[in-house]
Image (cartoon, rainbow, N blue to C red):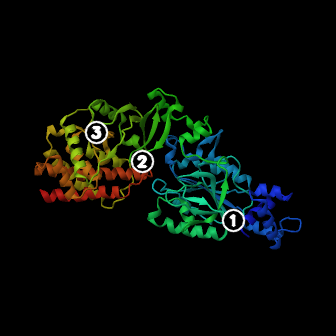
Amino acid sequence: MNIQEADILLQLIREPYINQRILAEGSSHSLGIVNRSIKSLSEDGYLDTAIRPTEKAKKEVEMASPKRAVILAAGFGMRMVPINTETPKAFIEIDGESLIERIIKQLHAVGVNDITIVVGFMKERFDYLIDEYDVKLAVNRDYASKNNLHSLSLVKGPLDNTYIIPCDIWCNKNPFNRNELYSWYMVSDLIDDESSVRVNRKSELSVVSEGASGNSMVGISYLTGDVARRVEEKIKKLAADKRYEESFWEEALYDKDRMIVNAKVVHSSEVVEINTYEQLRDLDDNSNQLQSDAIDIISQALNVKPYEIEDITVLKKGMTNRSFLFASQGQKYIMRIPGEGTDQLINRAEEASVYKTIDGLGICDDLVYINPTNGYKITKFLAGARVCDAESDDDLKRCMEKLRAFHERKLKVDHFFDIFGKIDFYESLWGGQPSEYKDYKKTKAKVLELKALIDEWVKPEDYALTHIDAVLDNFLFTDDGLRLIDWEYAGMQDTDVDIAMFCIYALYDRKKVDHLIDIYFDGQCPKERRLKIYCYIAACGLLWSNWCEYKRNLGVEFGEYSLKQYRYAKDFYRIVKEGM
């Protein structure tokens, strides 16, 4: 049977036949399609003379009907700032009911009780659902670095007769049924510029051309039969391929220019995907999750009402923090919210004292608010900003001029950034676990040898307020000039540390390191001072390698960056020794 015939048969399974007009309304097909389908279904033995489903029809429907469900709830929900800093998206409440509990209840209402929830971010929050609703949890430990294609690959058992459901969906009426006949993917009648598919005349989902719009992709899907088995095989194959680590599971549904499942089209008012704070506010302005510390702080700092905080947009997730852009009363701002584990890494009172020291000097971004206890920070948005290009000599010259001018001010604060002390400190945060690197102890011992050389070569006048994190992403070229941002790690140190830090973040080889040193010193860097910078590169490489190992234990992975930092510790130790 074709899709239209399947829809008609399902409607007759669910409700007894009254007349063709009612059947047309219930199945969303025209009277012409209803008439043809009834005739075809009768001829094929699916309907009897009274237009009732036969045993053959009931058996086929039973074989294809839902038996299980998978709810994908592992990710950060990055666009859901600032809510995602306090709760997983699955626990957003509408009219006092969390999204995930509503989905579970809707599944139970149609007899689907075998439910697996794939969790990751704040996974502990989901534990009570096991007792409350008899669900199973599957843990995606790589939720920070891999998308939900990987989440689905972790589910044990077949995907046959299975609903696949994103956790951030609110459905006005139950989208699930006791009976299904074919595989489908849900889209709405809303036209969406971000969609990659559109519904064609055959109820197929065809890929839209570049720049074109499609039907909004809701994300709920049903898989059965051969299609389910094809998707299972493709999920396993793609999940094993590193190129698909950031892919959505829908990647497994595509075959050339279309999806291998049919479209299930719903009205846009029936299903809402809640991706942003403002979408939640529009749907339920009394939701508990709207009571956000971040929103309260913005309201107080800017003296505005919560509804005057608009255009909330997530920025690229940083290595230490989550930040978001917002507008209020015609001005754009950035709010920084400290990331996982940063309370262990950064002294916010010291950071606040640094900002007090540099305030008004035109060095950093324009500070509006900073909390010396929890690290929340608001700055004015810098229009037209771009970061330093590590391969552009013009950019490097301007950045080094800015850095040198800052160093020459010889600013003072009351705290010191102890590189070797931090190496031990970050190591202590591993909780007694050994390093992932087998030769870590040997490498650390070599790096510690360099401390004596540094102490010998450093001069009292070398110490001043040092940025510590003066990396290319923190130099912003703006309409108003060059700014140096993000002073979380700043403290008293040898200012040459900033040169070393720039080099290792940019992943420079020795030739590029020497080139940057020559730019900073205008080609007049003494050999001893150059060797001292090499020492800092080795020490800071180990420092950030230890930092990366701590962050990895929190579920945050930095890939090549962490490997390169460890290599700096080993390679530049050797370079120092060879250069003496």
Residue ID for mark 1: 182
Secondary element at image label 3 = strand
Q: Choose top left, top right, bottom left or bottom right for residue 96.
A: top right
Residue 481's disc is 3
Q: Is residue 574 above or below residue 104?
A: below
Residue 497 visible in the picture = no
**Marks 1 and 3, how far apart at CA:** 60 Å
Specify which label sits upstream in the sequence, 1 or 2. 1
Residue ID for mark 2: 316
**Marks 1 and 2, how far apart at CA:** 39 Å
Q: Is residue 392 above or below residue 342?
A: below
What x and y, as percent, mark residue 392?
A: 25, 52
Residue drawn at x 81%, y 61% as measured from the top left: 12
Indicate the amino acid at tag 3.
Gly
Number of numbered discs visible in the structure rendering: 3
* Residue projecting furthest to the top: 303
Secondary element at image label 1 = loop
What x and y, as percent, mark residue 48?
A: 86, 68
Q: Is residue 90 left or right of residue 304?
A: right
* Residue projecting furthest to the bottom: 44
Q: Residues within 10 Å of mark 3 (few under 14, many from 20)?
A: few
Depth order, front residue of 142/360: 360
Quadrant, the N terminus? bottom right
Indicate the amino acid at tag 2.
Lys
**Marks 2 and 3, how far apart at CA:** 22 Å
Q: Is residue 479 left or right of residue 374?
A: left
